[in-house]
Image (spheres, rainbow, N blue to C red):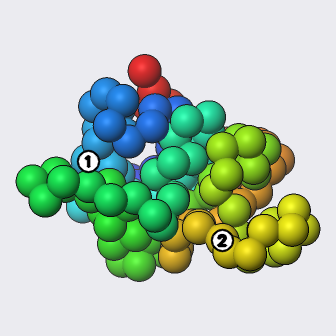
Amino acid sequence: MTDNSLSYTLVVTAAPGDNQANHSALAFARALLAKGHQLKRVFFYGAAIHTGNSLQSLPQDEASLLQGWQQLQQQAGTELILCIAAAQRRGVLDSAESQRFGHQQHNIATGFELAGLGQLVDAALETDRLLTFGG
């Protein structure tokens, strides 16, 4: 980080495809990183947890938000957190949660992790700015 850079946390509440909010969040994240700022964490809440579902199948002419967030995570090391309660309710599970509920498979995408609202609170306390993208 440079002397003038800030650290950010983003909260995304819109599901992929519901409106432009998820796309706007990704574009904003890319822009702030390009300007030398730090993006510590992106917290996906409510219907936005579908962003981290590895079983998404999009038409060929649509850009993949999943791949966009994964690329950002790989390049910047940003934590991509899916709210665990929202994810469980909507059937997006990692291997541990899948086993705990007696399911045979999991569907959380690479680069994403499940965590509670405490992670959002911690990020809000540790970063300079918290912005929400929803619809």
Q: Callout 2 environment at 10 Å: few (<14), some (14 to 19), or many (20+)?
A: some
Instruction: Single out the residue that lies furthest toward the top.
Output: 135
Point 74% across, 42% down: residue = 89
**Label 2: which residue?**
106
Q: Quadrant of the N terminus?
A: bottom left
Q: Nearer the viewer, residue 61 or 65?
A: 61
Point out which mark residue 27 bears: 1
Amino acid type indicated by mark 1:
Ala
Q: Nearer the viewer, residue 79 or 83?
A: 83
Instruction: Single out the residue that lies furthest toward the left.
Output: 61
First reached walking from the N terminus: tag 1 or tag 2: 1
Q: Quadrant of residue 22?
A: top left
Q: Nearer the viewer, mark 1 or mark 2?
A: 2
Helix, strand or loop at mark 1: helix
Q: 28 left or right of 1?
A: left
Q: 47 left or right of 36?
A: right
- 14, above or below 99, in the image: above
Q: Position of residue 65 (x, y in %)?
A: 32, 55
Amino acid type indicated by mark 2:
His
Q: Is residue 127 visible?
A: no
- 57, above or below 9, in the image: below
Point 40% across, 69% down: residue = 70
Q: Callout 1 environment at 10 Å: few (<14), some (14 to 19), or many (20+)?
A: few
Q: Is residue 134 visible?
A: yes
Point 18% across, 54% down: residue = 59
Q: Quadrant of residue 40?
A: bottom right
Helix, strand or loop at mark 2: loop
Cα separation between marks 1 and 2: 28 Å
Point 51% across, 58% down: residue = 52
Q: Position of residue 135 (x, y in %)?
A: 43, 21
Q: Position of residue 102 (x, y in %)?
A: 86, 68
How many numbered dots are placed on residues in this image? 2
